[in-house]
Amino acid sequence: MDIMNIIVCVLLFSGLFFLTGGAVGILRFPDFYSRLHPAGKLDTLGSLLAMTAFVIFNLHHFSIGALLTSLKILLIVVFIFLASPTATHGIVDAGVRAGLAPWTKGEKRR
Amino acid sequence: MDKQEEEELGHDHNTSKAENPDQGSGRRKNFGPYMVTFFIMFGVWVVLSGKFDPFHLSLGIVSCAIVTYLSADLLRPSMRGLLIMLFRWVPYLLWLIKEIFKANLHVTYLVFHPRMMDLIDPRIVKFRSNLEGDLALVTFANSITLTPGTITVNVSPDGDFKVHAIDKASGEPLPGEMEARVAKAFGESDG
């Protein structure tokens, strides 16, 4: 029980760490394309870790209802993993189609 | 009740075999895949509904059967294909999660680094992939996007990739090991 709590806390806080990194990255990176790197992907791993923590925490007191809830949370993870890269790619593609040139080293910050 | 219905349907096709032999045998051969689709959908139904009384279960059976029938032309997994996929995909997914973790740490390091502007060096990397199947290309493209530091900008049907990389280290290993592993997961590796 205690070990379970420690595992849940570690997973939750590392998930929060990556989510914070994503938010800070959006503010710090210089242009549209590089901002999508933290926005689209640090979030994915952050939510994977946080959701895993929820699943484990939820199974503390085992019952059919708790198992069903955990399975639903796992479904959320699966859909995030399918949708997030696709959406990121879609946004980047829209930027390229609109003719926005990527920032390169030495240019001024946008 | 629905099993009966489906069997009747199959029986109908068998009797009309004389008029339309190709279609009849095709339908008959691909009966198993329908059951695979049906059971996957029914599993999702049970998880999402969470009720085990006969009323809700029978509702699930009826709607899953209808959806299986309607999407018969769209989805046809085979039992053998599914098993092979499972054996090839699980190692690939584990490896991918490990890579995602490593690459995430790298991008987080960049994000929190005080001299971040000196470290990053965005560039567009172009390369040609030897993968052939559509699904393999999509998986490869999505895997590239999932590993931080790289986003797939564009893929042509022939396998020309344009990838936006955040710095030199992120873009360098492409296509490399990941392509080889995707090829293995889809059975396309040639040695």
Image (cartoon, coloured by chain):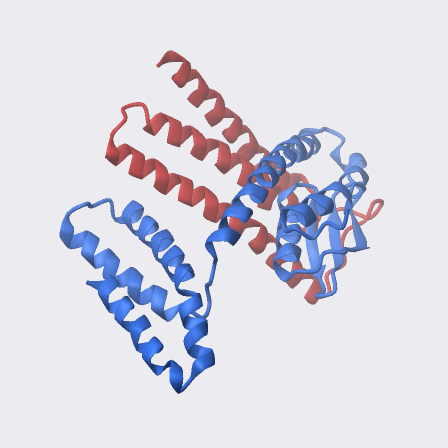
User: Residue visible at 36% across and 70% down?
Assistant: B70
Q: Relative to residue B129, is residue B95 depicted above or below? A: above
Q: x, y (%) of residue B92?
A: 61, 40
Nearer to us in this view, B46 or B72 = B72
Q: Quadrant of residue B134?
A: bottom right
Q: Quadrant of residue B7?
A: bottom left
Q: Relative to residue A32, is residue A13 depicted above or below? A: above
**In the rendering, what colour is chain B?**
blue
User: Residue visible at 64% across and 63% down?
Assistant: A94
Visible residue check, residue B20:
yes
Q: x, y (%) of residue B47?
A: 30, 45
Nearer to us in this view, B162 or B167 = B162
Q: Relative to residue A4, is residue A21 depicted above or below? A: below
Visible residue check, residue A30:
no
Q: Relative to residue A52, is residue A10 depicted above or below? A: above
Image check: B128 left or right of A14?
A: right
In the current view of this chain or complex, which residue is farthest to the front?
B18
- Supply the letter of whichever chain is red: A
User: Residue visible at 82% across and 48% down?
Assistant: A107
